[in-house]
Amino acid sequence: MKKNDLFLIGGIIVFVFVAFLLLLIFRTEGSKVLITIDGKEHKTFNINEDTTYNILLDNGEWNILEIKDGYVKMLDASCPDKLCVKHNKIRYNTESITCLPNGVDIRVIGGEESDLDAIAK
Ligand SMILES: [Zn+2]
């Protein structure tokens, strides 16, 4: 093996490592969770901060949101259909969980596109 080959391989390894690191940083900084109630912005969370949040509506209805390990899910809700509770966990940009009866919409914004995830499924 020539010396130049070693430099080339070393360069590729460094490049891949840096690219991976940037991806990781981008993912960490990028993703937010936006809660909208009746189309109005209610609250924003960082998707990387584990939390449980109770959304209380003026009419007494409620939704409980959980953010854990970078995923968002509806833990429980007062709506009759519970479709939002049955919804899969979300984590990628533009994915959302909507609770139609309560008018609550939870959306991931500014994060990574879901192309990779689609392949993994
Ligand atoms: Zn619901």
Image: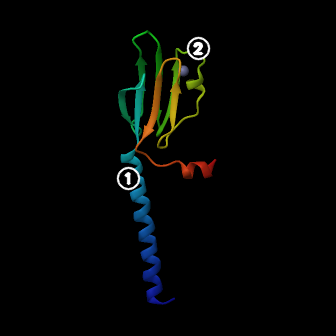
Against 58, residue 100 (above or below) is below
Q: Quadrant of residue 23?
A: bottom left
Dot 2 lies on which element? loop
Dot 1 lies on which element? helix
Q: Residue at x 41, y 27 (%)?
A: 36
Q: Given the image, on which type of amino acid does mark 1 rest?
A: Ile
Image disc number at residue 40: none
Image disc number at residue 80: 2
Instruction: Residue 5: give x, y in percent of width and height.
Output: 47, 85
Rounded to the nearest whole Å, what is the CA distance between mark 2 and mark 1?
40 Å
Query: Mark 1 or mark 2, which is nearer the start of the sequence?
Result: 1
Q: Residue at x 37, y 33 (%)?
A: 45
Residue situated in front as seen by the camera: 117 or 21? 117
Instruction: Residue 14: give x, y in percent of width and height.
Output: 41, 70
Q: Quadrant of ligand 1?
A: top right
* Mark 2 beta carbon near ligand 1 (under 8 Å): no
Quick one: which residue is furthest to the front in this view? 39
- With 109 as the anchor, is 101 left or right in this view? right
For mark 1, what is the residue?
25
Q: Given the image, on which type of amino acid does mark 2 rest?
A: Pro
Mark 2, Cα crowd under 10 Å, few <14 / some 14-19 / many 20+, is few
Q: State if disc 1 and disc 2 touch (CB < 8 Å).
A: no
Q: Residue at x 53, y 48 (%)?
A: 114
Against 29, residue 45 (above or below) is above
Instruction: Residue 13: give x, y in percent of width and height.
Output: 45, 71
Quick one: which residue is furthest to the bottom in this view? 2
